[in-house]
Image: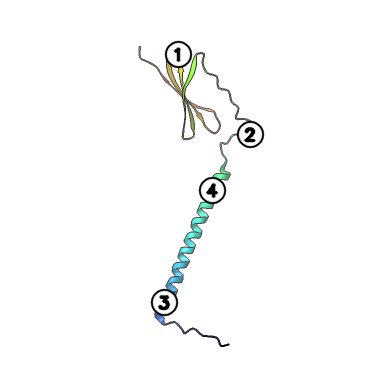
């Protein structure tokens, strides 16, 4: 058996092959960088863990005034929002969704 030898590429062909190799190298490095950024972002979100409640401390009892009733609940960003009707006065109470600690209170009253 005889080995077939490929002819030497012309200078134009050699330049085209070098250009394709360079473009493939740039595309490969860009893809590797994008994958690294995604993995770093996922790792950061997984291991950040600040503000997360410890197990067993999420059972919290919030005392409402006598005659109050919950009209609506909602989640806004990292806040839990409760709308209360307290004897005809509307009040909005917000809590941190991760720690369930009170974050604020807004009361609406009618002018006399």
Mark 2 residue element: loop
Contact, mark 2 vs mark 3 (Cβ under 8 Å): no
Residue position for label 4 = 42
Q: Secondary structure at mark 1?
A: loop
Q: Which residue is mark 1?
A: 87
Q: CA distance from mark 2 to mark 3?
A: 64 Å
- CA distance for labels 4 and 1: 48 Å
Which residue is found at the position 51% from the left and 56% from the top?
Answer: 35
From mark 2 to mark 1, how far is it between C-alphas?
36 Å
The residue at the far left in this view is: 112
Measuring from the top left, give residue 83's x and y in whole percent.
45, 23
Compare marks 1 and 3 and give the one earlier in the sequence.
3
Q: Secondary structure at mark 3?
A: helix
* Residue highlighted by disc 2: 55
Upstream in the sequence, badge 2 or badge 1? 2
Residue at the image position 42 percent from the left and 14 percent from the top: 88
Reply above or below: 76 against 7.
above
Is tag 2's residue or tag 3's residue first in the polypeptide sequence?
3
Residue 14: which quarter of the image? bottom left
């Amino acid at each position: 058996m005889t080995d077939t030898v490929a002819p030497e590429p012309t200078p134009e062909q050699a330049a085209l092959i070098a250009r394709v190799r360079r473009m493939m190298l740039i595309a490969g490095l860009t893809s590797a960088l994008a994958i690294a950024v995604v993995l770093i972002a996922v790792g950061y979100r997984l291991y950040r863990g600040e503000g997360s409640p410890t197990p067993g401390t999420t059972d919290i009892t919030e005392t409402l005034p006598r005659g109050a009733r919950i009209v609506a609940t909602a989640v806004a960003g990292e806040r839990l929002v409760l709308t209360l009707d307290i004897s005809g006065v509307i009040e909005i109470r917000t809590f941190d969704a991760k720690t369930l600690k009170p974050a604020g209170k807004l009361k609406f009253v009618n002018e006399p």
